[in-house]
Amino acid sequence: EKHLSDRVNNMSTSATLAMAAKARELKSQGKDIIGLSLGEPDFTIPEFIKDAAIEAIRDDIHAYPPVDGYAELKNAIIKKFKRDNHLSYEPSQIVVSTGAKQSLANITMVMLNPGDEVILPAPYWVSYSDLVKLAEGVPVEISTTIETNFKITPQQLEAAITPKTKLVMYSSPCNPSGSVYSKDELRALADVLKKHPNIYVVSDEIYEHINFGNEHFSMAQFEDMYDRTIVVNGVSKAFSMTGWRIGYIGAPTWIAKACNKIQGQITSGANAIAQMATIVALEASPNEIQYMVEAFKNRRALILDLLSEIPGMKTNTPEGAFYVFPDISSFFGKTIRGKKIDNAGDFSLLLLEEALVATVTGEAFGDPNCIRLSYAASEQEIREAIKRIKEVLG
Ligand code: PLP
């Protein structure tokens, strides 16, 4: 390891993937693990999307696609932005990537110089801080609590800004908290940013459709923020296409061009077959996936109901995505089944080893008081998991 670069040695392993690996290991030892750690819908891909992929293979789609995506897919993305977000883009403003994760990696690499600061409202998605560090930027976290539904205030944003601030990066609906910023809340944040014209916003909207009633609003919809906002989206969550690896951005042309340039040296264009399938996914009405959203909504009600029966587990009502993010700090300092609980990592490990339920520690998301439970699992699994957790904590 000493011969590896500082870049990789200073990097943390994705905690969600690490937990999944640990759970898999216990499973292979014959342990009956229930996985509530992964951010992955448990539905299959709708048939019409699969058909489009099969057709693309039969049509001999095999050549390298354009680095920034097929023109036809870019048009479908432009229409989607118009239909769902009232946003207008030209093809030169769209870049298709190998998952939204690559979109985010492109953005940090093209926007950051060493020492540039990126404001991350915490809790934030697990990879943001390491992507920033990889680009030699400096993550600046703003802490929130469950009492404010894990949302930052304009005052907090103002206080975090320095002459070095380059980006503000967040997801709404949020992974891990499920919080959704309303139009008014975003406007208040935009009013702060208005005073700082050199700061850009990365608005990760990958959970856009998994929203239980609030209107989805994008920072880019404010006229005065459009030229300063990079919208990130993809098909992993809405269409259950996690393994197909398609994400995309809508951005100012000069930023999109730079992303295209860097992607051209690293991966080239995203998988051709998956791109062809994404066209039909995006062209379909959001009603086509409403059944998944309804199922997530029912599971949210179920898991909140069950968790409310566990003393010491403080929850709020997440408004979107498919996670609950309870504050479990009341357990700190206690010893449960012979294990001392000093932090959220200890707590998450206790649940894995004693309840055989995989969760993720909030530390990975910049919140040391919480753990994340994904309810992208069957109702039966959710019931059994929470029953076991209750027994261990009981
Ligand atoms: N952004 C957020 C907030 C996520 O939760 C995820 C996936 O977990 C991603 C981006 C990455 O998505 P993709 O599968 O498109 O790379």
Image: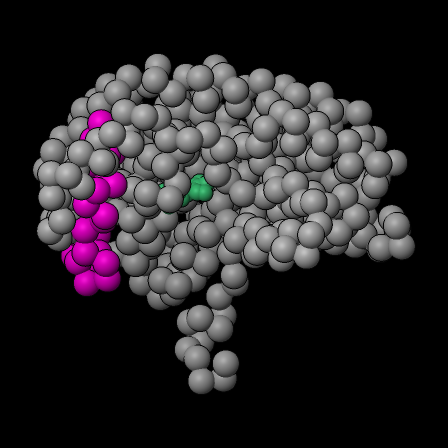
- Residue at image position (66%, 27%) is 380
Quadrant for ligand 1?
Answer: top left
Residue shown at 59%/28% (left/top)?
A: 378
Residue at 23% of width from left, 58% of height from top? Answer: 267
Residue at left offset 51%, top offset 56%: 14
Image coordinates of residue 191 in percent, x first then y, are 38, 31
* Rendered location of residue 288, percent (x, y): 34, 17
Q: Position of residue 220 (x, y in %)?
A: 29, 31
Can residue 342 be seen in the rendering of this structure? Answer: yes
Q: Please give left or right for residue 183 compared with residue 358 in the image.
A: left
Q: How is the image coloured?
A: one colour
Extent of the magenta region: 258-281
Q: Does the magenta stretch include residue 280?
A: yes
Residue 324, compared with residue 198, is above or below; it is: above
The answer to whether residue 77 of the structure is visible from this angle is no
| Relative image position of residue 331 (x, y in whole percent) | 82, 43
For this rendering, which residue is in front, 321 or 42? 42
Magenta-colored segment: predominant secondary structure: helix
Quadrant where the image shows the C terminus: top right
Please tell me which residue lies in front, 278 or 190: 278
Nearest the viewer among 349 and 127 is: 349
Is residue 231 a member of the stretch shown in magenta?
Answer: no
- Residue 38 lies, with reference to residue 297, above or below; the image says below
